[in-house]
Image (cartoon, helix red, strand yellow):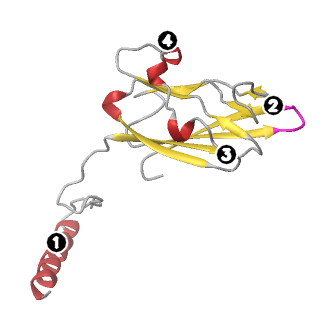
Amino acid sequence: MLRRASRAACLFAAMVGLATAGCLVSLVPDNNGGGTTNPPTTITIKVSNQTSRYVDSQVYVGKPGETKDVFFTIPADQQKGAFQFLHAGEEAVATVSCDQVDFLGTLGGLYGDDLRNPLKAGQKKILEMGDSVQCGDTIVFTFTYDVLRDSLITSLAIVPLGG
């Protein structure tokens, strides 16, 4: 404990000395518990069903080498499991490795009591890695039902790392 306090006092004295000498001192928080900050390696995808019925989010992750014109046509790119059949009010979250993503998006989502015969479909959203989304970001797809327009609304939000 005394050794840690002594190190902190030395660090503080060095920072004060540098700052009074006209040097800019900035501290970068270390979120990993070590001495260096590692760059993020994943993207988080969150899906929120804010409707009163089932939603299939139809989320796809396009692998490197695929184009945005075809990744929605590749069955292996669809993120099934928790994203496929969301109950009313349910949310699902998953992470994907940044080096495994060129594109990600949703075909718009399907809405209804029987998703094999949906009542409505939402709007397509496509994001490109490095352009509209960065490693460390959280992508949030929210599905709501607009009664006045009788339509499924697909919303997208990108939350940057630390945002």
CA neighbours of label 1 inside 10 A, class few (<14), some (14 to 19), many (20+)? few
Count of labels shown? Answer: 4
Q: Which mark is residue 70?
A: 4
Q: Give the mark nearer the N terminus: 4 vs 1.
A: 1
Which range is magenta?
Answer: 146-151
Q: Real-space Cα distance between discs 4 and 1?
A: 58 Å
Q: Amino acid at mark 3?
A: His
Can you identify the residue that label 1 sits on? Answer: 17
Q: What amino acid does circle 4 point to?
A: Val
For label 2, the residue is 151
Q: Nearer the viewer, residue 48 or 55?
A: 55
> CB under 8 Å between callouts 3 and 4?
no
Instruction: Give the residue drawn at x 69%, y 50%.
Output: 89
For the residues labelled 2 and 3, say whether their Cβ atoms are less than 8 Å apart.
no
Q: Which residue is mark 3?
A: 87
Whole-percent x, y for residue 80 in the image: 51, 33
